[in-house]
Amino acid sequence: MTGAGCAASPRSWTATNLDLDEIDFVPMETEGKRLPLLTLQETHDLLNWLRLVTAESGAHAPEAERWAKEIAARVPSQE
């Protein structure tokens, strides 16, 4: 980055100049506790539901299809 708002030129900046204790990170908001892991049967139920949403071709179908593929790649088949 260059310009008036940049404190260092690209040539002078390196990872060794980075002091994480001096950076003001935005605090992460936690909206609640994480759910425990799903059982295999619950995961297959969710996967089947996502496939139904995908088949309906509604507004949420593309996102449901993406999640169905992600989950299907990570769990054993239901045979």
Image: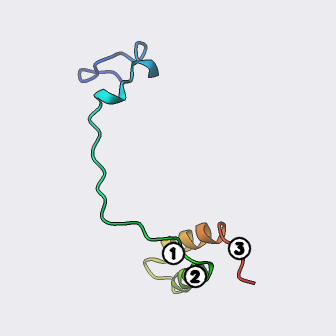
Task: Look at the numbered disc 2 and give the secondary structure of its residue.
Answer: helix
User: Residue 3 appears at what percent x and percent y?
Assistant: 28, 21
- Which marked residue is nearer to the observer: mark 3 or mark 2? 3
Type of the residue with mark 1? Ala
| Residue 76 pos. (x, y %) | 71, 73
Looking at the rendered structure, the kind of residue marked 3 is Pro
Q: Which mark is residue 76?
A: 3
Task: Kindly report the distance in space between the C-alpha atoms of the residues bearing marks 3 and 1.
Answer: 19 Å
Q: Image quadrant of residue 9?
A: top left
Q: Of the residues under marks 3 and 2, which one precedes in the sequence? A: 2
Label 1, label 2: how many angstroms apart (C-alpha)? 7 Å
Name the residue beneath numbered marker 2.
51
Q: Quadrant of the N terminus?
A: top left
* Viewer can see residue 25: yes
- Give the quarter of the figure containing the C terminus: bottom right
Q: Amino acid at mark 2?
A: Arg
> 55 left or right of 72?
left
Q: Secondary structure at mark 1?
A: helix
Asked whether the beta carbons under mark 1 and mark 2 sit within 8 Å of each other, the answer is yes
Query: Can residue 14 be seen?
Result: no
